[in-house]
Image (cartoon, rainbow, N blue to C red):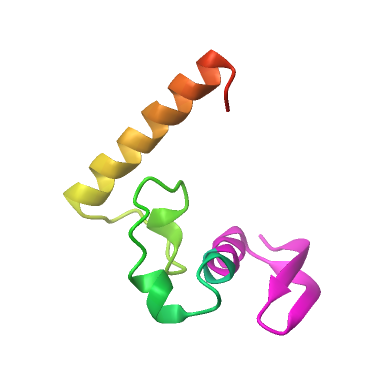
Amino acid sequence: MAIEHIYKTKDGTQAGKLTPIKAIRHKCLDCCCWQINEVRACSVKTCALYLYRMGKTGRVCSKGATDALQKARSMQKTLSNRGGF
């Protein structure tokens, strides 16, 4: 299901339809200055987009990535309960 977006690209801003996975991939590329190797080597395992950064669903992941995701979710819940997120 593609959704109409206005998004950043390496060459500026563009409008078009992106699936949620492609939108996440674009965000990760933007975060890493459009360097594909930097997205692959991302060390921010607490990022909510971490499992999806390579443009895949993230359903099959390593134990370490699953643990990091669970920690990130619990941290987000804690912060939202305190009103700080």
The boundaries of the magenta stretch are 1-27
Farthest residue to the left: give it: 63
Q: Is residue 53 above or below residue 70?
A: below
Image point (42%, 70%), residue name: 39
Q: Residue 41: percent from the left, percent from the top? A: 33, 70
The quadrant of the rendering that contains the C terminus is top right
In this view, the residue in front, 57 or 50, is 50
Image point (20%, 49%), residue name: 64
User: So how many labels did they put on this image?
Assistant: 0
- Splitting the image into 4 quarters, where does residue 33 fall? bottom right
Farthest residue to the top: give it: 82
Q: Residue 17: percent from the left, percent from the top? A: 74, 69
**Is residue 69 in the magenta section?**
no
- Splitting the image into 4 quarters, where does residue 24 fall? bottom right
Farthest residue to the bottom: give it: 11
Image point (63%, 63%), residue name: 19
Image point (20%, 54%), residue name: 62
The quadrant of the rendering that contains the N terminus is bottom right
Q: Residue 60: percent from the left, percent from the top? A: 28, 56
Q: Is residue 29 left or right of residue 36?
A: right
